[in-house]
Image (tube, helix red, strand yellow):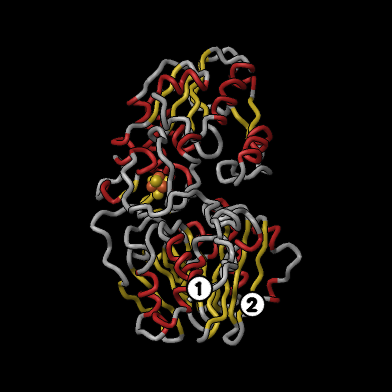
């Protein structure tokens, strides 16, 4: 998120980050500028925790950027929390990144071989080095030239002491919007942040566009042509984004309701109640109930003091979180045929547990309906979808998965159903995790810890005698 030209930028960023907490729970931070100095505060934890007891008035300025971290590259540790800040030859820069760069490993190795030192194990840091590189520093439109070196998925916000910038990759993988707040401007991943701070939505940052806001106002240019084949992440619509956001021009809740309605027509079954997995299955369950005429009821109660388990970085945390997160209402499910609606099955551990819980509480039949197709391939563009071997659907047919999770029936939304709500451009969406058709070549497929210390073999110093 970024703001420019707003009073008390830190307070505005705080509110906007808070609204987007669902996008990352591991760390949070912000950098604001008073025109002379960049003021930084960041740390591990939720927005409220990181800024607890920290007076936002200690972060003066009317421009800044902020970030909530969900690690898809680099371990969940303090150094990797963004924004990243660097002192370059021409002044201080701060950057914050959403997405995954598919050529970051190559760029990093190349800079390291030239003697550069990296402070983090994230892919994002290569942009700092490109910005500092004299080759780009001396050229017009240097930021655009640096961005054009990157491949993969990125929505970036950047700042100097007096300007903020926002850029989106040519495929448009990740959402990024611009809004107006009084005389100032705001950039955010989701429109829910704009609404939270009272900003008006203007438009999306276009794929391949770099927008700069400074004392002269807003200016924009294309640093790359938009890719002929767009690749907006359809998983934002399925799970990631907040239901009250507009993402890629579509309301997320309404899209999920449409998924549920389509799911009911693709996979009908006789049952007594439809229950959602809260919160992610709620909108699709409403749609399923609406289209099937089967009443919607509350079968699970969610403990809101446990965060989003899908985006927890470690499997152990996810499993512990799952155990604490949901409780069944036996009064709702006992003696009934139940349809459970959820957004996706990734590893399968979640849904297996839930089916067993429902049976233990007296459900006579459990039918599972999933509002996206089987997740068969990993994501290399910014969603932490396990390795292929961990994915429940990577090498299993639907019937095998049904047996694994212990359900009476299992139905996934078709790929046609997934794209059906996007009347003006289904081809603009990435769905590689469902069909393996990756829109951008992935140079490094080494997983999210590939840049951790020790992950790359460093050649030992050559102590042999020099030969002439
Ligand atoms: S592979 Fe899946 S999760 Fe990754 S960007 Fe594409 S649609 Fe989104």
Element assignment for label 2: strand
Q: Is the residue marked by circle 2 packed among few (<14), some (14-19), or many (20+) residues within 10 Å?
A: some
Q: Residue at x 67, y 62 (%)?
A: 43
x, y percent for residue 2: 51, 70
Element assignment for label 1: loop
Work out whether mark 2 precedes mark 1 in sequence or the reverse, and give the earlier one: 2
Q: Residue at x 28, y 51 (%)?
A: 428
| Ligand 1 contact, mark 1 (Cβ < 8 Å) | no
Any mark on residue 39, and which? 2
- The part of the image, by quadrant, that contains residue 170 is bottom left
Q: Residue at x 58, y 12 (%)?
A: 335
Task: Work out whether 310 lies above or below 58.
Answer: above
Q: Residue at x 67, y 55 (%)?
A: 45
Instruction: Please indicate, yes or no, whether residue 254 appears anywhere in the rendered image.
Output: yes
x, y percent for residue 92: 55, 81
Any mark on residue 467, and which? 1
In the drawing, does residue 63 fall left or right of residue 223?
A: right
Q: Which residue is outermost to the right?
A: 53
In the drawing, does residue 59 fall left or right of residue 103?
A: right
Contact between marks 2 and 1 (CB within 8 A): the answer is: no
Viewer-proximal residue among 394 and 403: 394
Instruction: Please indicate, yes or no, whether residue 158 appears anywhere in the rendered image.
Output: no
- The part of the image, by quadrant, that contains residue 49 is bottom right
Task: Work out whether 196 lies above or below 368.
Answer: below
x, y percent for residue 460: 58, 62
Viewer-proximal residue among 151 and 350: 151
x, y percent for residue 215: 46, 86
């Amino acid at each position: 998120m970024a703001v420019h030209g707003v009073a008390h930028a830190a307070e505005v960023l705080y509110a906007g980050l808070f609204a987007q907490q669902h996008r990352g729970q591991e760390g949070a931070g912000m950098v604001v500028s008073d025109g002379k100095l960049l003021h930084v505060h960041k740390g591990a934890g939720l927005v409220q925790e990181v800024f607890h007891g920290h007076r936002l008035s200690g972060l003066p300025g009317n421009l800044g950027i902020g970030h909530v971290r969900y690690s898809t590259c680099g371990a969940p540790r303090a150094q990797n929390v963004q924004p990243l800040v660097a002192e370059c030859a021409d002044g201080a820069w701060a950057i914050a990144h959403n997405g995954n760069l598919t050529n970051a490993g190559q760029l990093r190795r190349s800079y390291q071989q030239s003697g550069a030192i990296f402070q983090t194990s994230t892919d994002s840091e290569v942009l700092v080095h490109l910005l500092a590189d004299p080759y780009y520093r001396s050229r017009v439109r240097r930021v655009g030239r640096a961005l054009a070196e990157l491949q993969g998925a990125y929505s970036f916000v950047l700042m100097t002491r007096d300007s903020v910038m926002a850029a989106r990759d040519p495929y448009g993988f990740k959402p990024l919007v611009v809004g107006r707040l009084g005389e100032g401007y705001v950039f955010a991943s989701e429109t829910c942040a704009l609404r939270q701070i009272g900003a008006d939505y203007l438009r999306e940052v276009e794929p391949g566009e770099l927008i700069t806001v400074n004392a002269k106002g807003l200016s924009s240019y294309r640093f790359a042509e938009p890719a002929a084949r767009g690749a907006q992440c359809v998983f934002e619509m399925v799970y990631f984004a907040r239901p009250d956001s507009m993402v890629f021009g579509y309301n997320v809740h309404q899209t999920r309701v449409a998924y549920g309605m389509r799911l009911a027509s693709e996979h009908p079954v006789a049952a007594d109640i439809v229950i959602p997995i809260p919160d992610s299955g709620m909108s699709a369950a409403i749609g399923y109930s609406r289209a099937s005429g089967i009443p919607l009821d509350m079968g699970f109660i969610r403990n809101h003091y446990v965060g989003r388990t899908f985006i927890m970085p470690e499997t152990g945390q996810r499993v512990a979180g799952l155990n604490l997160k949901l409780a069944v209402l036996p009064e709702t499910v006992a003696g009934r045929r139940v349809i459970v609606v959820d957004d996706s099955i990734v590893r399968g551990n979640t849904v297996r547990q839930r089916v067993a819980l429902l049976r233990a509480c007296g459900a006579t039949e459990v039918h599972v309906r999933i509002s996206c197709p089987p997740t068969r391939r990993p994501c290399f563009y910014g969603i932490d979808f396990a390795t292929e071997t961990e994915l429940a659907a990577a090498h299993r047919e639907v019937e095998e998965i049904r047996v694994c999770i212990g359900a009476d029936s299992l139905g996934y939304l078709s790929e046609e159903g997934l794209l059906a709500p996007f009347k003006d451009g289904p081809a603009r969406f990435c769905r590689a995790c469902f069909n393996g058709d990756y829109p951008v070549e992935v140079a490094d497929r080494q997983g999210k810890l590939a840049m951790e210390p020790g992950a790359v073999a460093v050649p030992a110093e050559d102590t042999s005698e020099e030969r002439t």
